[in-house]
Amino acid sequence: MNTSKVGVTNRNVFLRAGGGKYAALNSAAEFGRPAAAPIKSRSKKGKGYTRATGTLFGDRERRGKVVFPAARDSIRRFASLQIQTTLRTLHEAGEKVK
């Protein structure tokens, strides 16, 4: 029985994997997963079973595949924006005092 589902909203397309714990699948999507690594799941009837993801998520990558690289690229820009905003606010406050 195939329990995986695809959903669509006005902002996203999402995949739901049937069986398997969210944390294990979430980690696999970000960092990859060894093909033979087992995932313990339960059927709708409550029977436990183990399955493997195969090569679906690609090889394990310590630095991440999506979230970590995006955060690395963005953090400098966020810090720069915060510093610029602070300096501008202080400068404008100083102008009002004069």
Image (cartoon, rainbow, N blue to C red):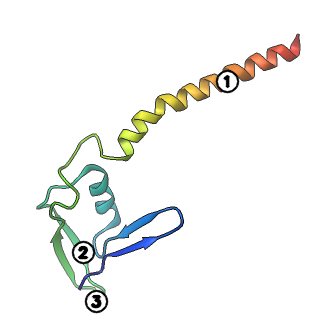
| Residues at marks 2 and 1, CA–CA distance in whole angstroms | 50 Å
Badge 3 density bin: few <14, some 14–19, many ≥20, Cα 10 Å: few
Q: Residue at x 15, y 61 (%)?
A: 37
According to the image, label 3 marks what residue? Answer: 45
Q: Is residue 80 left or right of residue 63?
A: right
Looking at the figure, which quarter contains the C terminus? top right
Label 2 vs 1, first from the N-terminus: 2
Rendered image: mark on residue 42: none
Q: CA distance from mark 1 to mark 3?
A: 58 Å
Q: Residue at x 23, y 57 (%)?
A: 57
Neighbours of disc 1 within 10 Å: few (<14), some (14-19), many (20+): few
Q: Secondary structure at mark 1?
A: helix
- Quarter assignment of residue 7: bottom left
Image location (x, y in percent) of residue 19: 28, 75
- How far separated are the C-alphas under marks 2 and 3? 11 Å
Which numbered marker is on residue 86?
1
- Left or right: residue 74 versus residue 49 is right
Give the x, y percent position of residue 68: 36, 42
- Position of residue 29 measured from the top left corner of the image (x, y, whole percent): 30, 56
Q: What is the quadrant of the N terminus in the image?
A: bottom left
Q: State the image coordinates of residue 27 (x, y, percent, origin top left).
A: 30, 55
Q: Is residue 55 left or right of residue 16?
A: left
Give whichever of discs 1 and 3 has the lower sequence position: 3
